[in-house]
Amino acid sequence: MKYKTIELSHTNEIIQTYGVNSLMAKVIESKKIDQKQFKSFMDPHLVYHDFSLFEEADETLERIEEAIANKEKICIYGDYDCDGILATTILVQAFHERGVEVGYHIPNRFTDGYGLNTTRVEQMAEKGYSLIITVDNGIKAFDAVEKAGELGIDVIITDHHAFDGEVPVAYSIIHTKMSPKYPFKEICGGFIAYKLAAALLKHHDPYLFTLAAITTISDMMPLLDENRSLVRRGLQFMKQYKYPSLELLKGNRNYDVTTIGFTIAPRINAFGRLPELVNPVYLVKYFLKEADPAYLEK
């Protein structure tokens, strides 16, 4: 195993400037955390950047409200990892709370591959869907989005993955790195889905907030800025409300970052790797608020 050596030369300066001990100073220097980030990190108050800061937020909400008003068929298209599964759950639940039934799909890792694909788009067209909302994928789905346009389906992409300059010609795209006004870029698909859900519901939901916290840990996002606030408050909600779906997954462990990162998230990810045993789509049903307790026990 190779180790990377980091030369630290400003530790004493950081101790004086930040008022921290030597260990914390070394972390600050090695991670290149500036004073603004450090202040945000230490701030106990909730940091939350509103959905309206995304570049195409208005277009996205207007198109979804139009689809709801016209009773169009909407499909949420997720991913087979923890982030994608819970991001899908978050949006499906938000629509349910608006009194809207939506379709949703978690792709099979082995037969579908990653992200939205043309075969699934064609199937959705046959079933009468006119709006697809991707979560945790889509920013590189050029062929699928083009096919959707040919078939009269609008695609809203919500994603956080890297892209190489060009992006698909979708109806709208929600991505931090395409949004100059969005102040913190490193959030995951589940947190973006939560922000869209909160905008649709016009209020914050503790359970959906908690699911977004789990996705942030599972995707190993930096626990700075609003990610830190999300995880901190999400852990409080888990301990306070003891959600049945999470209680069963954590077993006899305490709610903390380690339990989520090494117990809950891996158990969710496992279903995406073993689709022949359990279709990951059923995990969305498992995490919905209205899931039957008997179903959870299965």
Image (cartoon, rainbow, N blue to C red):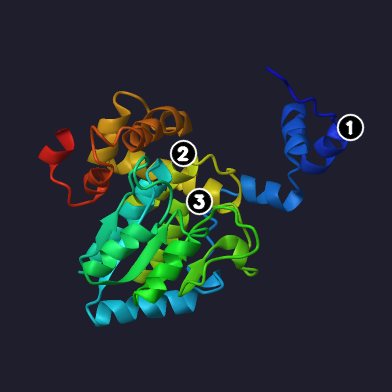
Q: Mark 3 points at which residue?
A: 188
On the question of residue 237 being in view, the answer is: yes
Amino acid bearing label 2? Ser
Disc 3 on helix, strand or loop?
A: loop
**Callout in the foreground (1, 3):** 3
| Sooner in the amino-acid sequence: mark 1 or mark 3 | 1
Q: Mark 2 points at which residue?
A: 218
Give the image location of residue 105, x and y in percent.
29, 54
Q: On the image, which quarter does residue 20 sit in?
A: top right
**Is 138 located above or below residue 279 in the figure?**
below
What residue appears at the point 24 percent right and 41 percent down from the top-left corner? 279
| Sooner in the amino-acid sequence: mark 3 or mark 2 | 3
**Is 31 located above or below residue 85 in the figure?**
above
In the picture, which quadrant includes the N terminus? Answer: top right
Q: In this view, does 172 lie to the left or right of 223?
A: left
Confirm or deny contact between disc 3 and disc 2 (CB under 8 A): no
Q: Extreme left residue here? A: 294
Which one is nearer the viewer's eye here, 198 or 138?
138
Spatial CA distance of label 1 from label 3 is 33 Å
Q: Please rate how many residues cluster around mark 3, counting C-alpha atoms within 10 Å: few if below 14, some from 14 to 19, many from 20.
A: many
Confirm or deny contact between disc 1 and disc 2 (CB under 8 A): no
Amino acid bearing label 1? Ser
Q: Name the residue under label 1.
A: 9
What residue appears at the point 45 percent right and 32 percent down from the top-left corner? 261
Amino acid bearing label 3? Cys
